[in-house]
Image (cartoon, helix red, strand yellow):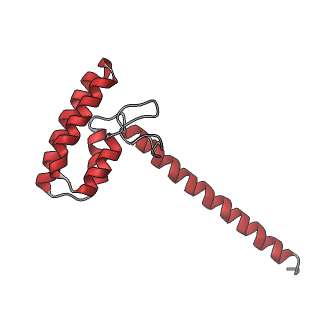
């Protein structure tokens, strides 16, 4: 092997390795995103997302929260055709019912997820960055 061929092979090998890693990483990210999108069409997807966000909970608290969230989610689906203002009332009621069961940190995270409510950019955790003009 000539001295000029070795560096060229190393560069080509490094380039091919980078392309391979990029393809593998990209496909993993895409698969994860598609899975998240599919979850939103499933029943109780909002409840599951909120409970995952809260982290580990004791069984009694998780059962109490799941009951509250499932009931609220069913009401939200029924009321979806009635307008955003009625959903806002359900969301506020849900937050009030959950508050005594959660720590301040957990309550803040849940409020961040569901407290925004429905909107053009999605509610229920769809919007990632807080709007600077909104509390």
Residue displayed at 26% across by 49% down: 51
Foreground: 74 or 23? 74
Picture layout, residue 54 above or below residue 36: below
Foreground: 122 or 39? 122
In this picture, residue 18 sits left or right of residue 36? right
The x, y position of residue 88, in whole percent, is 29, 30
In this picture, residue 5 sits left or right of residue 61? right
The x, y position of residue 107, in whole percent, is 26, 51
Image quarter of residue 97: top left
Foreground: 37 or 68? 68
Residue 52 visible in the shown view: no
The x, y position of residue 34, in whole percent, is 46, 42
In this picture, residue 9 sits left or right of residue 51? right
Residue displayed at 37% across by 31% down: 118
Residue 76 visible in the shown view: yes
Picture layout, residue 37 above or below residue 32: above
Residue displayed at 47% across by 42% down: 131
């Amino acid at each position: 092997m000539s001295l000029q061929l070795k560096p060229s092979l190393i560069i080509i090998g490094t380039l091919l390795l980078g392309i391979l890693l990029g393809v593998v990483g990209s496909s993993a990210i895409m698969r994860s995103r598609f899975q998240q999108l599919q979850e939103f069409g499933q029943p109780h997807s909002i409840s599951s997302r909120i409970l995952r966000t809260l982290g580990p909970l004791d069984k009694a608290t998780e059962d109490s929260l799941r009951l509250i969230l499932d009931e609220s989610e069913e009401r939200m689906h029924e009321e979806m055709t009635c307008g955003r203002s009625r959903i806002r009332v359900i969301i506020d009621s849900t937050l009030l019912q959950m508050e005594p069961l959660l720590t301040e940190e957990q309550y803040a995270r849940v409020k961040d997820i569901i407290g925004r409510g429905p909107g053009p950019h999605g509610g229920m955790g769809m919007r990632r960055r807080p709007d600077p003009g909104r509390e």
